[in-house]
Amino acid sequence: MKTIRNMLVAVSVSLSCGSEAAILLNAGTTYTQNFDSMGTSQTLPEDWQITFNDLFTYPLNNPYLDSSSSLDFQVSSGTPTTPGTYNFGSAGGLDRAVGSIPYSTFSTENSLSSLLLAHFRINDPAITSLRISYDVETYVIGESPILTVLGLYSSSQVPTDWRYLASSLGAGSATGHYFTAPPSKTVNKVLTSANFTTGDLYLIFQFNGEGANGLALDNVSVTAIPEPGSILLLMSGIMLACRRNRPHRSFLVGVSPGF
């Protein structure tokens, strides 16, 4: 059984070689991204992309066509209102989050969206579900805090393949600027094997806002949960390895000390 599983994983890996880079997911592992490693950089982590002024009304268009790995601004103080994509930071701290400010003043005609995109690749056929979690944070609230993050997912970049993941209203409901302790809400979602296959998985986080409303994503985690049989197999392998590595003790019967 173990040999067959390893062969399937090897085939999956070999098929992915030479294709677009992606975040690899294997059974029993968790991918996390809190964007803190960016510091004040405007370059997104590898395999993350972003677009601005792009309302993604699936399944009409492909969001990867105009995406970028660079943000427009980084900020951790003041009262920013310039529209664009942002690396938001806590004042005097290391905590970062990625999002956008849609428009400098409130107007329903100027309601814009930005799309934060991540590309994963599921290598292990033993994965039966994916546990997805992320925080929605409000760093700047403008005239009308109408903020929503819409989560979508797809196993390809085909426009008609995008499906609903989850939706969350932005945190906070009063005018103000938050950089020391930004209000946040946590979203949790589980995808079963009926919702994905071995291979590519794309996640989209669509920020919908009006006015100078800063909304960001933070603390993303994707856990690949294996089938129960795989867990038992993994534990058995670990126990066997521990027994093999246990030091052996030998005793000489009838030999007195000193010899």
Image (cartoon, rainbow, N blue to C red):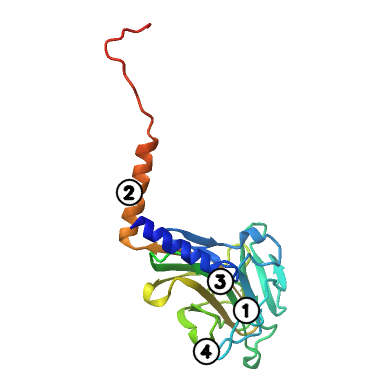
Q: Position of residue 42 (x, y in %)?
A: 71, 67
Question: Alpha-carbon distance for marks 2 and 4?
Answer: 45 Å
Question: Alpha-carbon distance for marks 3 and 4?
Answer: 18 Å
Q: Is residue 100 visible?
A: yes
CB atoms of marks 2 and 1 within 8 Å = no
Q: Nearer the viewer, residue 63 or 121?
A: 121
Residue at the spot of label 3 = 119
CB atoms of marks 4 and 1 within 8 Å = no
Question: Alpha-carbon distance for marks 3 and 2?
Answer: 33 Å
Q: Is residue 20 left or right of residue 222?
A: right
- Vertical placement of residue 41 versus 56, above or below: above
Q: Position of residue 3 (x, y in %)?
A: 38, 56
Question: Alpha-carbon distance for marks 4 and 1?
Answer: 26 Å
Q: Residues within 10 Å of mark 1 (few under 14, many from 20)?
A: many
- Vertical placement of residue 172 versus 1, above or below: below
Which part of the image, by quadrant, shows the C terminus?
top left
Residue at the spot of label 1 = 213
The mark nearer the N terminus, 3 or 1, is 3
Q: Residues within 10 Å of mark 4 (few under 14, many from 20)?
A: few
Which part of the image, by quadrant, shows the N terminus?
bottom left
The mark nearer the N terminus, 2 or 1, is 1
Helix, strand or loop under label 1: loop
Q: Is residue 2 left or right of residue 56?
A: left
Residue at the spot 68% in from the left edge and 83% down from the top edge: 103
The mark nearer the N terminus, 3 or 2, is 3
Question: Alpha-carbon distance for marks 3 and 1?
Answer: 27 Å
Question: Alpha-carbon distance for marks 2 and 1?
Answer: 52 Å
The tag on residue 236 is: 2
CB atoms of marks 2 and 4 within 8 Å = no
Q: Which amino acid type is shown beneath numbered disc 2?
A: Ser
Q: Nearer the viewer, residue 236 or 192?
A: 236
